[in-house]
Amino acid sequence: MTTQTPEKLYEAEVKQADLDHHTPTAGAMTGHIVSNLVILADKLQQIKWYVKGMNAASLKQTIADLLQQAYRQKDTMGSVLIDEALLTPTTQKEFTEYAMLQENGRNKYQNADWLVDDLVHDYDTSNLFVTRAIKLAEKEDRPVLAQHLTTLLGENNHNIAFLQALLGKTPREGLDEEDDED
């Protein structure tokens, strides 16, 4: 029995991840989701620490709840990938490379409405990857992964609707292209 070194195992992982990301798979797409959740958690932490205004106390609690949810979602999705014998990103380099969400130190100086609106758009962007990953998981006959992704989609949709309500908007207002054309 030949034992591979950690270096060889990691080299094979990097090669497989590169291949998966050039030919989208459910695993690769879910890796993007995990990375987005890491960036989302960082943004939520920043908001929790810096949000100001008359409703700051209640908003901080809402953000704290969303932060705990993001941590749970990241852990769950990473675990499901491992259970499915797929790769999950685990380093800051990978999170940065695979995430589509953007963080910015300047955001802490924005007002609460701007921060909430930015979160709405982050959840909406995340859903682009979630819906694509669901389709790929179904195509690849990975029902457990598809189920977890569907749960994530439902939670994201709920968060969008809740945050939009805080802004006095309907759930999809300002998000769908059709709304922008009216």
Image (cartoon, rainbow, N blue to C red):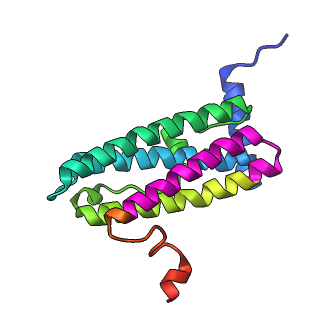
Where is 135 relative to 141, above or below?
Answer: below
Residue located at (64% from left, 46% from top): 149
Where residue 47 sits: x, y (%)? Answer: 28, 51
Front residue of this view, candidates 70 and 106:
70
- Quarter of the image for residue 15 reads top right
Describe residue 107's horizontal placement relative to residue 178 as left or right: left
Q: Hey, which residue is sitting farthest top in the picture?
A: 1
Q: Main secondary structure of the magenta part?
A: helix
Where residue 94 sits: x, y (%)? Answer: 55, 43
Where residue 27 sits: x, y (%)? Answer: 70, 44
Describe residue 53's horizontal placement relative to residue 86 as left or right: left
Q: Is residue 98 visible?
A: no
First to last magenta residue range: 136-164
Residue located at (19% from left, 48% from top): 57
Residue located at (30% from left, 66% from top): 114
The total number of labels drawn is 0
Residue located at (36% from left, 64% from top): 165
Where is 146 relative to 163, above or below?
Answer: above
Q: Hey, which residue is sitting farthest left in the picture?
A: 54
Where is 182 relative to 79, above or below?
Answer: below
- Would residue 9 be counted in the magenta stretch? no
Q: Hey, which residue is sitting farthest right in the picture?
A: 1
Front residue of this view, candidates 76 and 82:
76
Quadrant housing the N terminus: top right
Q: Is residue 67 visible?
A: yes
Describe residue 1's horizontal placement relative to residue 73 as left or right: right
Where is 5 relative to 70, above or below?
Answer: above
- Would residue 143 be counted in the magenta stretch? yes
Where residue 91 sits: x, y (%)? Answer: 52, 36
- Quarter of the image for residue 129 reads bottom right
